[in-house]
Amino acid sequence: MRIVVIGGTGFIGQAVLKEFLMTWGRELQATVVTRRKEGAELFPIWQRPFVWDVNESPPPPSLIDGVDAVINLAGETVAQRWTQSAKQRIRDSRVLTTRNLVESFRQAARPPKVLVNASAIGYYGDRGDEELTEDSPPGSGFLAEVCQLWEEEALKATEFGVRVVCARFGIVFGAGGGILERMMPMFEWGLGAKLGSGKQWMSWIHVNDAAGLILHAVTNEQIKGAMNVVSPNPVTNRDFTRALARAVGKPAFLATMLSIPTFILRMQMGEGAGALTASQKVLPKVAQATGYEFIHPDVEEALREVVHRRQLLSLALASTD
Ligand SMILES: NC(=O)c1ccc[n+]([C@@H]2O[C@H](COP(=O)([O-])OP(=O)(O)OC[C@H]3O[C@@H](n4cnc5c(N)ncnc54)[C@H](OP(=O)(O)O)[C@@H]3O)[C@@H](O)[C@H]2O)c1
């Protein structure tokens, strides 16, 4: 199994690479495309780094030629203040990277069998209590527009006979990255709180299931087009707040009473605050219809697992000091 992972240095990328290693072992040949020129010695021996900024230009077709799967997870973080230049980086790092990648497929003698390209449930916009599946129309707003452009670029690879899956990630929970890494310290200090009203739906997924679903999409030829990468049990922000407070052993009652007002979020993140309070009740219709079995379908259990893994990671780090 030969795979190329763009953005494979990131939070989801590392989990995906481990999932593939567990499945294929020594048969796996994994190339990680990274912009980082230094630190090649930090890559695990089984991940071959290839330094290229796909944002800037198409990677050489020889990199892609004959590989089984290309997984594109590159993207500037959205968890920052959305200035005009930040919005441009957020858009370009997704749309241009995908365009350049597909251009290299055009040039390759043997394009990959499948492209799994990241997207996000931001595609659906802010949709209240509506249940959303892959068949639902897109919403409005900056992220919804970026996701549509991102997916349009990825789907152009079908012209070269590539099966394309647009993985619409929900909020990914895991140790060592993602939203929880930022939120956890506040909850551990007993300062956890709802975001805004707390009534908004959060569609989440444990990082092990996110990686499991990418593997599922690569190996399951039935899957084409959009695939929601979310657990079957979305929760309101209030229920998430309660579950996270419990998972870190702090009073859940207090956390669900307190709330961070929307204007404070706006002061910190500008327009990006809307992404934190948007309501998206997204269901994994494609994953379930194609037989994917979730490892962590329950939010309380998933959060307890993340807290436990974070504790193990900090113990491991302390023992290497
Ligand atoms: N985590 C979530 O909850 C979540 C939710 C919805 C969607 N997603 C999407 O899933 C993908 C992976 O997420 P993640 O959490 O693993 O992100 P991450 O940890 O930030 O990793 C993303 C990778 O993209 C590359 N990258 C960062 N900024 C870039 C830029 N300006 N131009 C080109 N490449 C850039 C980096 O690789 P190098 O530095 O090695 O080049 C980085 O390792 C992203 O596209 C994200 O939008 C994630």
Image (tube, grey):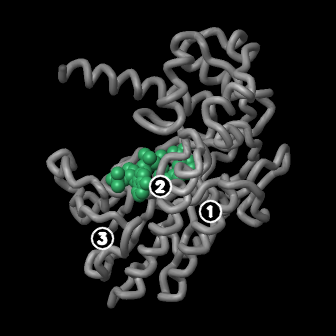
Q: Residue type at mark 1?
A: Met
Mark 1 and mark 3 lie on one chain; the one further toward the N terminus is 3
Instruction: Determine which residue is flagged by label 3.
Output: 2
Q: Quadrant of the C terminus?
A: top left
Q: Which residue is mark 1?
A: 227
Question: Is 120 in front, or is 207?
Answer: 120
Above or below 169: residue 30: below
Q: Is mark 1 within 8 Å of ligand 1?
A: no
Q: Position of residue 82 (x, y in %)?
A: 59, 44
List the single residue furthest toward the right.
129
Element marked by disc 1: strand
For marks 2 and 3 on the same chain, the one whose residue lies earlier in the sequence = 3
Q: Identify the residue at horizontal 53%, vertical 51% (top origin).
A: 85
Q: Mark 3: give few (<14), some (14-19) or many (20+) Cα within 10 Å.
A: some
Tags 1 and 2 in contact by the CB under 8 Å rule? no
Does label 1 or label 2 sit earlier along the sequence?
A: 2
Q: What residue is pinned by disc 2?
A: 75
Residue at mark 1 to residue at mark 2: CA–CA distance: 18 Å
Q: Are marks 1 and 3 in contact (CB under 8 Å)?
A: no
Q: Secondary structure at mark 3?
A: strand
- Measuring from the top left, give residue 232's x and y in whole percent: 68, 47
Does mark 2's beta carbon lie closer than 8 Å to ligand 1?
yes
Asked whether, in this view, residue 293 is left or right of residue 47, the answer is right
Q: How packed is label 1: few (under 14 Cα within 10 Å), some, or many (20 or more)?
A: many
Question: Cα distance, mark 1 to mark 3?
Answer: 22 Å
Q: Is residue 291 visible?
A: yes
